Amino acid sequence: MSYFNNWRCTDCGKEFALDEVRYLCPDCAQGYAPGVPLPGVLEAVFDYPALREAWQAQPDPRLFSVLDPGFYPTLPVGDTPFFRPQRLAANLNLPELYIKNDSLNPSGSFKDRASELVVADAIRLGINEIVCASTGNAASSLACLCAAAGKKAVIFAPAKAPAAKLAQIRIHGADLHSVAGTYDAAFAAALEYSASHACLNRNTAYNPLTIEGKKSAGLEIFLQLGAVPDWIVVPVGDGVILAGIHKAFVDLLRAGLSDKLPRLLAVQAASSDAVTSYWESGVYRDAANPMSIADSISVKTPSNARWAVRALKETRGQAIRVSDNQILKAQQELARQAGIFAEPSSAAALAGLQSAIEQSWIAPGDRAVLLITGHGLKDINAVR
Ligand SMILES: [Zn+2]
């Protein structure tokens, strides 16, 4: 069973039943065209009193799922390690540092959490095809989960996506369409495809299940720490992981299972800083030329920019830019001091944490969680 009640538009507040709407709020999305942050992104609303009771009897992140867990594919996703990296913590003078290592998901990335829920929806609805735009990780993840469930994945990815991610997409048997240009061009191509085919669209934020799926990492952190941390450090491209982590703690608060939100630190590559500049100036503008070595967070128009900035406001968070040099240095430190080989976008989180400590945003006594979102073997050119 599920404790889901209804969808609610994060812009106008209008409410919808589960199958009344699949993607954006139809009112707010009128006139939407690719190239601007998505209007009318939906959030799930639950029967919070019943959820609280069920959680207190037996805590389980799946209690907060939109869908009955009986629809989930059988490939295990999530429940990833959470631990204190002793040497790294000592070197940062941050004794209460924790790592949530989501690179140990089946396809090697955090994105499996979103793919799992969208594939579960395809199983529930009896739909056989799912389309997705991706810089690489969401695509290799969807290909992986679709293979486990016997569904067809159709992928639109930039031609210059890292070779290992393209290999993952192929080995899992997905249909791969290379798109000239960036992630933003792939996003538009996937929207066009799903408008004319009987399939589900897994574009991030466009399909609200992607945010709801990513939420499970936040719920696991709450369970594994046994408390709400002071800070969670999140690498940010399109803003959907940030929104997912935020939603987890909002749901826990609404259910009366916690009494505060963690502060969120959004870390962006300097050339892909649309969320950071929106947060600082209050005025949205695209990233001019997103060309970071951290391909997973290289985005011109972050689809979930509005929610990302709201999450930073509500959690008294911060946003920060890091250079490619800082990212590469942090990638090596993470590998040599914590034993974790993370892809550049995940190493960006450590670079951002280091800057936040230097600026005294994060104090030595704070409990901080570093979210590692993708495995380093997915992109070895960065290391070369
Ligand atoms: Zn709306």
Image (spheres, rainbow, N blue to C red):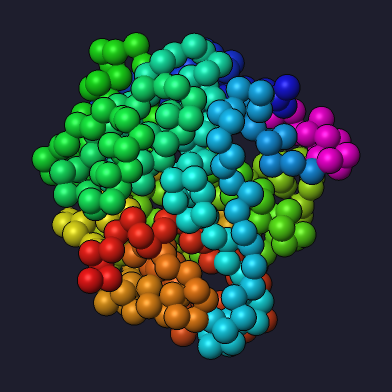
* Vertical side of 219 occupied by 38: above or below: above
Q: Residue at x 28, y 63 (%)?
A: 380
- Residue at the spot x=59%, y=39% of the render? 76
> Any magenta on residue 188?
no
Residue at 59% x, 75% y: name it. 85
Q: Quadrant of the C terminus?
A: bottom left
| Camera-nearest residue between 148 and 319 | 148
Q: Residue furthest right?
A: 57
Q: Position of residue 305 (x, y in %)?
A: 38, 47
User: Where are the magenta residues, as a range?
Assistant: 44-58
Indicate the quadrant containing the N terminus: top left, top right, bottom left or bottom right.
top right
Q: How many marks?
A: 0
Query: Which residue is most to the left?
Result: 180
User: Would residue 52 be counted in the magenta stretch?
Assistant: yes
Q: Compared to 363, does 303 lie above or below?
A: above
Residue 58 location (% of width, % of height): 84, 40
Residue 352 visible (yes or no): no
Note whether 282 is above or below 192 in the view shown: below
Q: What residue do we see at 79% from left, 43% from top?
A: 59
Dominant secondary structure, magenta: helix
Q: Nearer the viewer, residue 71 or 95?
A: 71
Quadrant in which residue 67 is drawn: top right
Q: Is residue 224 visible?
A: yes
User: Is 141 displayed left or right of 82 in the figure?
Assistant: left
Expressed as whole percent of the image width and height from the top left, the position of residue 92 reads 53, 85
Q: In the figure, is residue 383 to the left or right of 56?
A: left
Q: In this view, which residue lies farthest toward the front? A: 171
Q: Position of residue 279 (x, y in %)?
A: 39, 58
